Image (tube, rainbow, N blue to C red):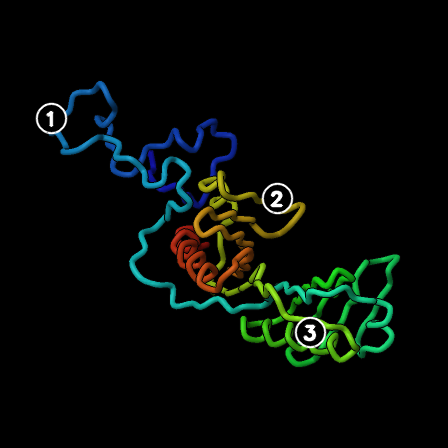
Amino acid sequence: MDKSSASPFPSYGHGLSQGSLLSPGMGPGSYPGTTTTTMLPGPLFPPTPGGPMTPMTPATPVSEGSGIVPQLQNIVCTVNLNCKLDLKRIALHARNAEYNPKRFAAVIMRIRDPRTTALIFSSGKMVCTGAKSEEQAKLAARKYARIVQKLGFPAKFLDFKIQNMVGSCDVKFPIRLEGLVLTHGQFSSYEPELFPGLIYRMVKPRIVLLIFVSGKVVLTGAKVRQEIYDAFENIYPILKGFKKT
């Protein structure tokens, strides 16, 4: 049997489960109960770190870094202005603000530098989206808080927190998504009739990746920048193993 799980011609309906394939390094005489001429030191099946649900099983060994740095595309952050707000008053007196309570219970406000959008709620909570760096996110949130202050509200700047980061990059080669979903079925789902990308849910770091045939990758769900970088370095050798030839 071919040990490579990344066959260029994936077999559909072969009746074999993922765990029924031979593990790398197992010969025909490696099954318990068979006689082998050479005894290998240590247990036959060494324990897998982190138990059976290990987040990564790279198809190719990680020999060197990818040399690709994902670019941040969007940061979602929240802040508490710590005062009740009159949204009608904000919408009437602030620039670039819209408020339609029948459609959405918040003022939607935009600024150009940094190019961001804020959702401001009557409770004093605010959500800011669109920044491309942590510094931009905090600066934009402070600018929105200042606008609210200038309208006569005793707004403060409490509990600033980044809730989500989105990054993207291009591995510069096409990927066999059918082979990837067959081998990494417990982490991925791929339904091209509904969505053209494969959705890969990494366990550590806890990041969701959208992987496209073209080689484009979108990473989301990070709280800090390093999680995006780590997730990409984890997935890159796997993608290399499913490179279209």
CA distance separating discs 2 and 3: 43 Å
Which tag, 2 or 3, sits closer to the chain's start?
Answer: 3
Residue 229, compared with residue 177, is above or below; it is below
Residue drawn at point x = 70 percent, y = 62 percent: 125
Disc 1 to disc 2: CB gap under 8 Å: no
Q: Residues within 10 Å of mark 1 (few under 14, many from 20)?
A: few
- Distance Cα–Cα, label 3 vs label 1: 75 Å
Secondary structure under the numbered disc 2 in the rendered image:
loop
Q: Which secondary structure lies at badge 1?
A: loop
Q: What residue type is labelled 3?
A: Ala
Q: Which residue is drawn at 20% across and 31% down?
A: 43
Q: In which quarter of the image is the C terminus?
A: bottom left
Q: Residue at x 55, y 57 (%)?
A: 220
Q: What residue type is labelled 1?
A: Thr
Amino acid type for the residue under numbered disc 2 = Glu
In the rendered image, residue 121, in percent from the top left (x then y), is placed at 76, 62
In the rendering, at what x and y percent does residue 70 appear?
A: 48, 66
Q: How crowded is mark 2: few (under 14 residues within 10 Å), some or many (20 or more)?
A: few
Residue ID for mark 1:
37
Between marks 3 and 1 in the image, the one whose residue lies nearer the viewer: 3
Viewer-proximal residue among 153 and 76: 153
Seen from the viewer's position, the closer of residues 225 and 163 is 163
Side of 92 where 213 appears, left or right? left
Q: Which numbered dot is residue 145?
A: 3
Give the quadrant of residue 138. Answer: bottom right
Circle 3: element type: helix
Q: Quadrant of the N terminus?
A: top left
Judge whether residue 68 can be spotted in this image: yes
Name the N-terminal-most of marks 3 and 1.
Answer: 1
Q: Distance between the residues labelled 1 and 2?
A: 48 Å
* Residue labelled with disc 2: 191
Q: Residues within 10 Å of mark 3 (few under 14, many from 20)?
A: many
